[in-house]
Image: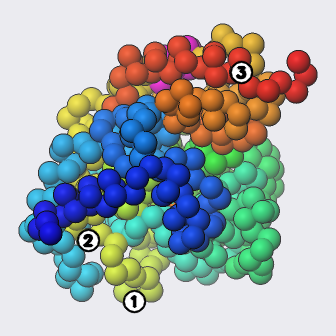
Amino acid sequence: MTTDLTAANQQLVDAGQGSAQWMERYQRSVLGVFGTPQRVLVRGEGAHVWDADGQRYLDLLGGIAVNALGHAHPFLVSAVTAQLATLGHVSNFFANPLQIALAERLLELAQAPEGSAAFFCNSGTEANEAAFKLTRRTGRTKVVAATGAFHGRSMGALAMTYKQAYREPFAPLPGDVVHVPWGDAEALAEAVDNDTAAVILEPIQGEAGVRPAPAGYLAAARRVTRAHDALLIFDEVQTGIGRTGAWFAHQLAELNGGDDITPDVMTLAKGLGGGIPVGALVTFGPKVTELLQPGQHGTTFGGNPVAAAAGLATLHVIERDGLLANVVAVGRRIQEGVQAHPLVDGVRGHGLLIAIQLREPVAAAAASNLLDAGFIVNAVAPDAIRLAPPLILTAAQADSFIAALPAALDSVPQENP
Ligand SMILES: *Cc1c(COP(=O)(O)O)cnc(C)c1O
C-alpha cells in the first residue's frame, strides 16, 4: 500500500491497461451525454498530452480554451498545491485574501470603474446564470441574445443559448429571451426597447464556429443599450483571459473599433483558472453592482482559496511571461500558415481562438486524421476546425501543426472528388 497519493493515482492509470479497456469501463459507468470520447488521456506537460497507450498529442484545443498555461504548469501546480496545503475551502460565510486579491486583479484588468465588483463561481454556465438572475433585478424581464449564441446548459443559461437541439428537450425554458441575427446591428437596434433588461453577446461567438463580431457591432450594442437603459453583458467565458491577445476580447481594437466599449456585466470562466474550475461575474459600476443584494445569489464552492489561487497564478504567469504578445504572434503565424490548401476557404478569429473554414463539410474527418497524426483540434462545425491552444504555444509547435495539416486534409473523403 502506498501513502503517496500521486503514486496511487499513477497506479490506477497503469492498472487500466490500454485505452480499449478504459473505454469499455467508461461506457458502463459514465453518463452518456458526451458521446464517445476520442481518446483516454492520462498525462500532460506544456502543450502536450499523452493517452493511455503512450501516444503523444500536441493539444491545440486546450481543454476547450481552458488550459491557458498548458498542462502541469509548474507555477500553477505550486500555487494550487501550496494553497490547498494552507487553506483549501472556507465557504462564503468567511472571506479569504486570495478571493479578494483575484477580484481586485480582475477589476483592474477590466479597467472597471469604482463601485465595480466580482462574484466567483465554478463555471461559465454559473457565471451566465448569475448574469441572467441579475437582469431580472432591473425590474424588466426581456433579454436579447444572438442567433448562434452559446451561454451554457442550466435552464437560465440555456434560455439565452440559441441551438434548438440543446433547448427543445427542456422546454419550457425561462421566458422573455429573444434571439436576433448575429452581427446585424439594425436587427439588434430594432429588438431593444424600453422593456429590455439586457443584451448578452459573445465578442467572438465560440461554439457557433469562432465568429467575431463584425466591425462596429459591439459599439452599436453599447449605444442601443445605453439609449434604452438596458444592460450590456459580454460573455467572455471563451474569449477572456488573454485568449485573443487582449485580456478581454472587447478590449481588442479589431472588435471595438478603437472605442472604449465597457460592458455593464462580463462573465468569465474557461481560461481563468488555467484548468481549475473558476467562473466569475463582473459588474461594472455601483448601479449594476447593487442589483444583486445580500441573500439574492450565492455559491458554496465559488471563490474558494484554491480556485482563487489558480486564478491569480494564471493571470500572473500570463503577465510575467508576456503571453498576450505570444498569443498575437503565434495566432498570426497559424492564420497565415494554414491558408494554402485547396480545401481551406479561409481563417477567422483573433489571437489563439481560430477557425479554419473548409470548403466541404469534412471537419470531423480532418480532425480525426489530425488526431491520428498527434494533433488535438475540434470540429466546431461540419465545415470548420477550431483551435484554442494553450497561450504558451510556441512558434515551432504551431509550425508542426501547419506542416501536418495538408496531409490530414488530403486524405479526407471528398464529396465531389
Ligand atoms: C463554454 C462556454 C460557456 C459555458 O461554460 P461552462 O464552463 O461549460 O459552463 C458559456 N459561454 C461561452 C461563450 C462558452 O464558450
Q: Quadrant of the N terminus?
A: bottom left
The residue singled out by tag 1 in the image is: 295
Q: Looking at the picture, tell me which residue is in the foreground, 89 or 186.
A: 89
Residue 232 falls in which quadrant of the image? Answer: bottom right
Q: Quadrant of residue 82?
A: bottom left
Residue beneath the point at 74% across and 47% down: 182
Residue lying farthest to the left in this orientation: 86
Residue behind mark 2 = 304
Which numbered disc, 3 or 1, marks the residue that appears first in the sequence? 1
User: From which residue to which does the magenta span run?
Assistant: 331-337
Q: Is residue 23 magenta?
A: no
Q: Amino acid at mark 3?
A: Ser
Residue visible at 41% across and 76% down in the picture: 290
Task: Give the class, few, some or many, for how many residues have Cα within 10 Å of label 3's Cα (few <14, many ≥20).
Answer: few
User: Which mark is in front, 2 or 1?
Assistant: 2
Dot 2 or dot 1, earlier in sequence: 1
Question: Residue 56 location, x and y as percent?
Answer: 41, 33
Residue on which the image places disc 3:
411
